[in-house]
Amino acid sequence: MALSLIAIVHFVLDEDDPQGIVRRFMDALAPGSFLALTGFTADTDPVGVVGVGREYNARGIPLQIRDKAETEAFFDGYELLDPGVTLVHHWRPDADAAPVRDQDIAMYAGVAVKR
């Protein structure tokens, strides 16, 4: 089984305990299940991404921007698969894909297994 939270958790504010929510879902899954998760970040473009966050929030759409450590915390207690939590374009990149600059990416990704 896999819990796929792609482009989801950044819409759950820290005050709503997103890590606790993810943990409760994972607790319901059998060992050997996977967690795939992405998180919106300003690590690569603080000015641009914070502006995006302001626009979402101004329109009534909650958006939580997290750094790498905060995204990694969603995987605490699970076995991260290589290459760990990294910018999405570095997660098993296609050698034939066009190059992408880190500053153009605002999303971390990771996959882990529950043992």
Image: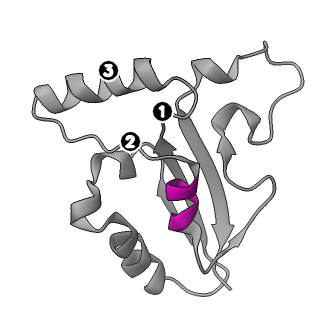
Quarter of the image for the C terminus: give it: bottom right
Residue on which the image places disc 1: 42
Does residue 16 sit above or below 55 in this rendering? below
Quarter of the image for the N terminus: give it: bottom right
Disc nearer the start of the sequence (3/1) = 1
The answer to which of 113 and 59 lies nearer the viewer is 59
Does residue 18 sit above or below 33 in this rendering? above
**Where on the picture, by quarter, is residue 50?**
top left
Which residue sits at x=52%, y=47%?
A: 38
* Majority secondary structure in the magenta region: helix
**Extent of the magenta region:** 69-74
Q: How is the image coloured?
A: one colour
Residue type, mark 1 in image: Ala
Disc nearer the start of the sequence (2/1) = 1
Say few, some or many: other residues with alpha carbon within 10 Å of mark 2 (under 14 / 14 to 19 / 20 or more).
many
- Picture coordinates of residue 86, whole percent (x, y): 69, 45
Residue type, mark 3 in image: Gly
Disc nearer the start of the sequence (2/3) = 3
Q: Residue furthest top?
A: 98
Q: Secondary structure at mark 2?
A: loop
Residue 65's label in the rendered image is 2
Which residue sits at x=73%, y=56%?
A: 84
Residue type, mark 2 in image: Ile
- Picture coordinates of residue 14, whole percent (x, y): 29, 59
Left or right placement of residue 104 versus residue 115 in this view? left
Residue on which the image places disc 3: 51
Say few, some or many: other residues with alpha carbon within 10 Å of mark 3 (under 14 / 14 to 19 / 20 or more).
few
Q: CA distance from mark 3 to mark 1?
A: 10 Å
- Picture coordinates of residue 8, whole percent (x, y): 37, 48
Which residue sits at x=58%, y=28%?
A: 44
Q: CA distance from mark 2 to mark 3?
A: 11 Å
